[in-house]
């Protein structure tokens, strides 16, 4: 559970060339050890928000306005070099599609080594020890044999775990998981959700869990923010969102669940 | 592997072996004149006869093949490196640099390549030492022949730039030079390799074109280009068909390259 102290406080708007107001005054606070769910339909700006926090909006030609305080530093004023030193070390990302997010030309060991070298210096032994520890943390116990494999030789569940291992290698304070379970089958999805819950518990890692799957979000997150057309229309505890939704869009979302549980207690909860 | 590709590989391997060891395989040095037997017909001593200066045609074909077959890959390497630098940087960096680089590439592509080659070569000194003529010819091929490869590589690099794994690597804080070395280059390698191999036959033919017009490798050093100049006199060729050996060798080698690397190019694309 969160300790109350905010590690990220953001209030931002994002524009793309030819498309203004992709995000409009989106205000989000994430506390230490908290899992915040961000739910919204496709195109509502969820991934844009994750890129904005990471300072990678320029990759899509976007520009952000507003402020983002992360661990007491204003991210919008940092240089690219300073942002690079934060990315992967204090602020990390897990993307949706595990296979396309891993470099197909490199072995898993090489990719993990690259991620390690981005923020650490030390011997090969030390690097290997940290890598195996991260793999163990994501329940990949046969880490040694995985290191020599290429992404195409992994199952989708293994690939997603490797991706999470890459992201938590340097024990970031905030992990942004951008639809990390959308490409997974139900069983793997459930395993990955449990994994996020465990990482949150054991490493006290805050997680911004972005998804359009309200049930998955409900099972994992302490609080939920609902994003609609670039605006946060509702934000509150999971219980409040499910039991007393205020905004019509939130009510629509809950009503649209395939088998909407009558009460929150019926949802499998991993994080509490 | 299809039987025809296997035959092509064996043929190229034998040809490359023969030209690499031309010093041992050739019955005579390429410039040695047998003045008593000019324009001789094939015999045991001169397998493809002799030319009008009495030089052994088989030896000249072997040495000429060596010049063409070894320097075309060198030119292909040069052009692929230039294409990788221009196209790769444009595709990976994007923005105004990509627009400027692509405009330059398109301009280069819009010019008839052979015409450009002939013009630029004609502007350079023609009366140079044979070795200098070799270097100039193939450097010119390499420097002027990168544009189509550059476009293909640019497109490949753009796809890599927009890929999830590059976004993931950036989100992990990887430094720009590590991104290029570890994320971009390994994934561009199949495209680079295909461009290199498919450029070789193009450069072999381009050298032959220059050689026929007297703008390629200078005599007495033989190359397929200047050997083909011997075909200018058609009645003489008709009377002595063995003089067609250089063009037969050229067609065979270029066809073999196409057969072998067509599939590689398809795979890369």
Image: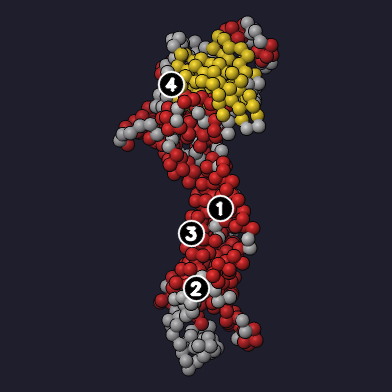
Badge 3 is on which residue?
A: B78
Badge 1 is on which residue?
A: B150
Mark 2 falls on what kind of element?
A: loop
Horizontal and vertical percent position of residue A179: 57, 25
* Chain bearing mark 4: A
CB contact under 8 Å: marks 3 and 2: no
Mark 3 falls on what kind of element?
A: helix
Residue drawn 55% across and 26% down? A64
User: Around disc 4, counting alpha carbons within 10 Å, would you say few (fewer than 14), some (14 to 19), or many (20 or more)?
Assistant: few
Mark 1 falls on what kind of element?
A: helix
* Chain bearing mark 2: B
Return the disc, 1 or 3, that comes first in the chain's sequence.
3
Please state which of the two labelled residues, at mark 3 or mark 2, is closer to the viewer.
2
Residue that lies at the very extreme toward the bottom in this rendered image: B36
What is the spatial separation of the Cα atoms under label 3 and label 4, in whole angstroms? 48 Å
Residue drawn 58% across and 12% down? A235
- Seen from the viewer's position, the closer of residues B79 and B204 is B79
* Chain bearing mark 1: B
User: Around disc 3, counting alpha carbons within 10 Å, would you say few (fewer than 14), some (14 to 19), or many (20 or more)?
Assistant: many
Horizontal and vertical percent position of residue A49: 56, 24
Above/below status of B46 relative to B130: below
């Amino acid at each position: 559970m969160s300790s109350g102290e905010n590690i990220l406080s953001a209030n931002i708007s994002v524009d793309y060339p030819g498309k203004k107001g992709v995000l409009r005054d989106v205000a989000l606070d994430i506390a230490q050890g908290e899992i915040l769910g961000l739910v919204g339909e496709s195109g509502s700006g969820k991934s844009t928000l994750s890129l904005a926090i990471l300072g990678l909006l320029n990759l899509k030609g976007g520009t952000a306005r507003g402020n983002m305080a992360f661990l007491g530093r204003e991210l919008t004023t940092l240089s690219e070099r300073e942002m690079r030193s934060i990315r992967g070390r204090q602020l990390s990302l897990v993307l949706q599609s595990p296979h396309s997010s891993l470099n197909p030309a490199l072995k898993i060991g090489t990719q993990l080594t690259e991620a390690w070298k981005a923020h650490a210096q030390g011997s090969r032994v030390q690097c290997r020890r940290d890598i195996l520890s991260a793999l163990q943390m994501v329940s990949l116990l046969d880490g040694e044999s995985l290191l020599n494999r290429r992404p195409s030789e992994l199952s989708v569940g293994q690939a997603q775990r490797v991706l999470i291992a890459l992201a938590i290698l340097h024990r970031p304070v905030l992990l942004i998981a951008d639809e990390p379970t959308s490409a997974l089958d139900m069983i793997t999805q459930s395993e990955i959700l449990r994994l996020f819950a465990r990482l949150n518990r054991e490493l006290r890692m805050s997680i911004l869990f972005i998804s359009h799957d309200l049930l998955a979000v409900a099972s994992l997150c302490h609080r939920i923010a609902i994003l609609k057309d670039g605006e946060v229309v509702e934000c509150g505890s999971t219980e409040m969102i499910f039991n007393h939704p205020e905004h019509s869009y939130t009510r629509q979302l809950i009503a649209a669940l395939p088998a909407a549980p009558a009460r929150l207690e019926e949802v499998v909860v991993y994080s509490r | 592997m299809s039987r025809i590709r296997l035959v092509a590989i064996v043929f190229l391997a034998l040809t490359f072996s023969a030209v690499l060891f031309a010093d041992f395989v050739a019955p005579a040095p390429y410039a040695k004149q047998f003045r008593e037997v000019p324009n001789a017909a094939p015999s045991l001593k001169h397998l493809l006869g002799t030319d009008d200066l009495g030089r052994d045609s088989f030896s000249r074909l072997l040495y000429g093949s060596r010049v063409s077959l070894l320097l075309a890959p060198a030119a292909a390497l040069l052009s692929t490196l230039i294409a990788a630098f221009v196209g790769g940087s444009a595709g990976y960096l994007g923005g105004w640099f990509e627009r400027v680089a692509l405009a330059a590439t398109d301009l280069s592509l819009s010019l008839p390549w052979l015409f450009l080659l002939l013009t630029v070569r004609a502007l350079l000194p023609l009366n140079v030492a044979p070795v200098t003529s070799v270097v100039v010819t193939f450097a010119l091929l390499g420097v002027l022949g990168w544009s189509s490869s550059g476009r293909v590589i640019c497109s490949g690099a753009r796809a890599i730039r927009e890929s999830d794994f590059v976004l993931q690597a950036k989100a992990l804080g990887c430094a720009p030079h590590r991104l290029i070395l570890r994320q971009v280059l390994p994934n561009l390698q199949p495209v680079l390799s295909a461009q290199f191999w498919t450029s070789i036959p193009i450069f072999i033919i381009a050298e032959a074109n220059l050689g026929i017009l007297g703008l390629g490798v200078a005599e007495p050093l033989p190359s397929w280009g200047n050997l083909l100049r011997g075909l200018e006199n058609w009645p003489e060729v008709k009377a002595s068909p063995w003089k067609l050996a250089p063009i037969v060798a050229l067609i065979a080698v270029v066809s073999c390259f196409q057969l072998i690397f067509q599939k590689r190019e398809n795979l890369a694309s």
